[in-house]
Each structure stands twice: as structure tokens, then as C-alpha cells.
Amino acid sequence: MNVILVGPPGAGKGTQAQRFQETHSIIQLSTGDMLREEVASGSELGKQFKEVMDSGTLVPDDMIISMISSRIGKDDCKIGFILDGFPRTTPQAKALDQMLGEKELKIDHVIEMKVDDDAMVKRITGRYTCAQCGAGYHDEFQQPEREGVCDHCESKEFTRRDDDNPETVRSRLQAYHDQTAPILGYYNKKGVMETVDGMAAIDDVTEQMNAILG
Ligand code: AMP
């Protein structure tokens, strides 16, 4: 099963994709994570990516398309994948169709996570992760049981994404509405679109997704 999650930053795509990776044995492919790995490597390319990401705009289509194309070609994707953060533009959606067509694969479901923009700013600017195991927390909605200690691995180190500040978040939301939302029409015409209420509690969203994906 091959799935795409679409929604503005903060909609919960990463959280739901991670859950599906665990419960449905499919691979989560996050272009944002791939880009952050390149940034963390300290390479020249990573420095270019960081500049774009910190401005809240999108990395050029050709770079993203070649990155995802080599990832989808790997053996572990044969069991199926859930794309989180890709495609983000119509050219990316068309390139994805072409690369899948060449492998005789297709997208089975595109799920839009519908949310309120104003709530997203609050959701994103308060989020942070454990630096050791990557568990996600939030200043207001999901604090660790013991203050300053990760519930899962007991690490006391946490990190925040550089692009999770109010100014960059507004640019990211704008990029979503201008460049990404048009792909919803593209997939609607193909008859593979479904919508879930991303404002619901995390477990409720998972249930809505289970109802679609089985
Ligand atoms: P994310 O982790 O999905 O919120 O992505 C963080 C940032 O990485 C975005 O704001 C973009 O600058 C960049 N990015 C991630 N995925 C894509 C994509 N498919 N196309 C262009 N830029 C992307």
C-alpha cells in the first residue's frame, strides 16, 4: 500500500506516518527528515538546504525529486510507503506519478489532514523532541511525566527545530496554501483523495486513518 499524507506544517503528518510505519509495516518517507539529515552532515548541499528551510520556503523541485526517486527505488520501499511532506507542488506530484509508473506502482490513498492555520502556529512553536530517541513533546499539550526527563529513554536533552519559530511558520503556511494545496485538486481528479479532521485528538486521527487504510 502506497499512501501520501497532505496537510500544512503542524497538521500531524509525521506523528501519524510514524504510527503507520509501526502498525502497518510500511516505510515512512519524510523529505523534511531527509533534508535535516543532509543539514546535520554539514555538507555544502546541507548548508544550502538550511538557508531555504530557515526562510520557510520550498527546496527546488528538481533536488527534491531526485532525492525521493533514489529513496523510493530502494528495496525496503517494496512493501509500501507513506509519504510525509512530499509531494509539495504539482510538478512534484507529476514526477512522482512518472517514477511510480516506471516501477509499475501507484498511489492507493491520498489523505488530507484538515486543520486551522491559527492553531498550527501554536502547535508548532511549542513542539520539541528528545535529542536521544526523537520522542515528541509540546510545551502545553504534551509535557514529559517528569519535568525535563524523556518518558521513553530518560534523556535530559531536548531539541527544537530552527524553523519552528512564529515568523518561519507563517511563511511555511503561506507556501502550503500557494504551492501545496493545488495538489489536492490533482489527486481529487484521480479519485484517490480522502480527508481526516486533523484538529481531533491524535488517537482519534489515527482511528479516522485506520477507517480509510484498514
Ligand atoms: P517538514 O519537515 O516536512 O515540515 O519540512 C521542513 C522544510 O523542508 C520545509 O519548510 C521545506 O523548506 C523543506 N521541504 C521538505 N519537504 C519538501 C518538499 N517536498 N519540497 C520542497 N521543500 C521541502
Image (cartoon, grey):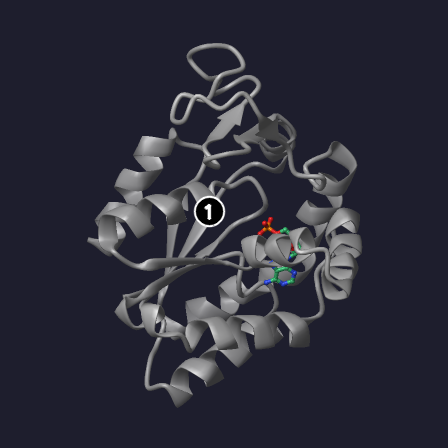
Going by the picture, which residue comes out furthest to the bottom?
Answer: 102
| Residue 96 image position (x, y, % from top left) | 49, 76
Q: Position of residue 164 (x, y in %)?
A: 68, 37
Secondary structure under the numbered disc 1 in the rendered image = helix
Q: Residue 37: x percent and y percent?
A: 60, 54
The amino acid pointed to by label 1 is Lys
Q: Is residue 76 left or right of residue 155?
A: left
**Left or right: where does residue 151 sit relative to residue 141?**
left
Q: Name the residue: 35% across, 69% down.
A: 77
With respect to residue 145, does 26 lie above or below? below
Q: Is residue 128 left or right of residue 45?
A: left
Q: Is residue 50 above or below residue 91?
A: above
22 and 125: which is toward the camera: 22
Instruction: Place residue 133 in its image quadrant.
Output: top left
Residue under label 1 = 13
Q: Residue at x 40, y 31 (%)?
A: 200
Q: Is 139 or 131 nearer to us in this picture?
A: 131
